[in-house]
Image (cartoon, helix red, strand yellow):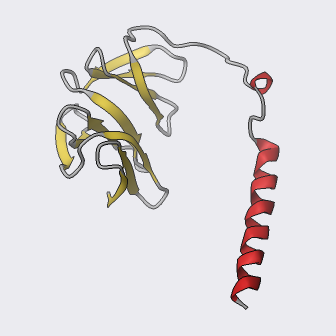
Amino acid sequence: MMIYIRKLSILLCSLLISASSLYTQSSADDFIPLTGIADGMGTPMRIAVDAQDNIYVADVNQKCILKYDASGSLVATLAEGTFPVSIAISPNGDIYYGDGLNGNIYNLGAGGQMEEFYTGSQYPSSMIFSPDQVLYVADNKLKKVLSAHH
């Protein structure tokens, strides 16, 4: 019975992967850049996009997060003086970033103030929110994926 369930699971996963590949980029020819954003950028590390299509770029050399509107125009410079190596936007629009110098994760408030969210990481290199507001953090130094409820 266990072998049958395992084979069925593998078959279903294969079908899902095959079906999803119909709608994904399968070659370099499928990628057609519409525009490029470079205004104000030094060294872009990670990007995130909010529900209004604003684009947030973690720029490690300039030690800030750059915010662009949907057309690619620079709107604001946020979290100045930090070392943002990762960025994520929660389903309700809150901006979180991981600081590569101290390993902490911060919530960037609407007024631009930084609030410490988590201090148990060492180098939060990548972050993403699930639809149910769980923050997943890949930590390069700890060599693990951490999760925290927002």
Residue beneath the point at 44% across and 8% down: 39
Residue beneath the point at 77% across and 61% down: 14
Q: Position of residue 117 (x, y in %)?
A: 21, 49
Please identify the quarter of the rendering in which residue 140 is found.
top left
Residue 113 against residue 115 in the figure, above or below: above
Q: Is residue 72 visible?
A: yes
Q: Position of residue 124 (x, y in %)?
A: 31, 41
**Quarter holding the C terminus?**
bottom left
Q: Is residue 56 visible?
A: no
**Quarter holding the N terminus?**
bottom right
Residue 117 in the figure: left or right of residue 13: left
Residue beneath the point at 71% across and 78% down: 6
Residue 28 against residue 19 in the figure, above or below: above
Residue 20 in the figure: left or right of residue 65: right
Residue 97 against residue 121 in the figure, above or below: above
Q: Nearer the viewer, residue 89 or 142?
A: 142
Q: Position of residue 57 (x, y in %)?
A: 41, 25
Residue 38 against residue 133 in the figure, above or below: above
Q: Nearer the viewer, residue 24 or 27?
A: 27
